[in-house]
Amino acid sequence: QVQLVESGGGLVQAGGSLRLSCAASGRTFSTYSMGWFRQAPGKEREFVASISWSGSSTYYTDSVKGRFTISRDNAKNTMYLNMSSLKPEDTAVYYCAAAHIIQPGVRPPDEYDYWGQGTQVTVSS
C-alpha cells in the first residue's frame, strides 16, 4: 500500500510557475507508475501527466505539453510536476495517484489504485 501527500499548490498570476510535489510512504514507491490529475469545480477529474516507474517514459495531456514537466526521484519517494506559463484554465485541485502498471500512458482515474488528498492551484488572470 502507498500513501500519497501532495504539496506546493497556491495562488499564482497567469504566466507564472509552480512546482507540485507528491511524497509517498512505503518502500515500494519505485514499483508504481505515477500520475497527476486535476479537477476543476463542476468538472470531472482529468488526466494531466504520468510517468513510468523508472521515469523513462512520460505522458501529457495536450493542453499542458510544453508547459508542464513530470519527474520523480525514487530515492526520495517523491514525484514532481513543474508547471510554467500557467493559465487561468489550469485552476483546479491537483491530485497525485499511483498505479501498478508498467506503462502508464494516458489512462482514466479509475485505473489508479492510490490517491492523495489534493492541492489547490489557482491561476489569476
Image (spheres, grey):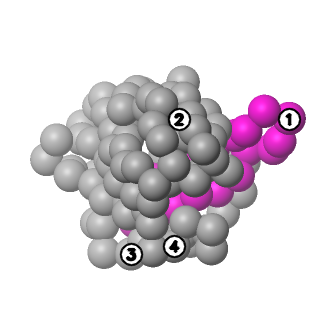
Task: Name the secondary structure under disc 3.
Answer: loop
Image height of 18 relative to 119, above or below: below
> Which residue lies under the disc numbered 1?
42
| C-alpha distance separating marks 4 and 2 | 18 Å
Observer-side mark, 3 or 1, equals 1
Observer-side mark, 4 or 3, equals 4
Earlier residue among tags 1 and 4: 1
Q: In the picture, which quadrant includes the C terminus?
A: top right
> Disc 3, disc 1: CB below 8 Å?
no
Q: Which mark is residue 121?
A: 2
The residue lying at 28 percent from left, 66 percent from top is 54
Earlier residue among tags 3 and 1: 1
Earlier residue among tags 4 and 3: 3
Within 10 Å of the Cα at label 2, are there few (<14), some (14-19), or many (20+) other Cα atoms? many
Q: Amino acid at mark 3?
A: Ser
The residue lying at 37 percent from left, 49 percent from top is 17
Earlier residue among tags 3 and 2: 3
The residue lying at 81 percent from left, 44 percent from top is 44
Q: Which mark is residue 57?
A: 3
| C-alpha distance separating marks 3 and 1 | 31 Å
Q: Magenta span has 32?
A: no
Magenta-tinted stretch? 33-53
Kindly indicate the quadrant of the structure image that contains residue 42.
Answer: top right
Q: Find residue 35 and report its horizontal and vertical position in percent.
A: 50, 53
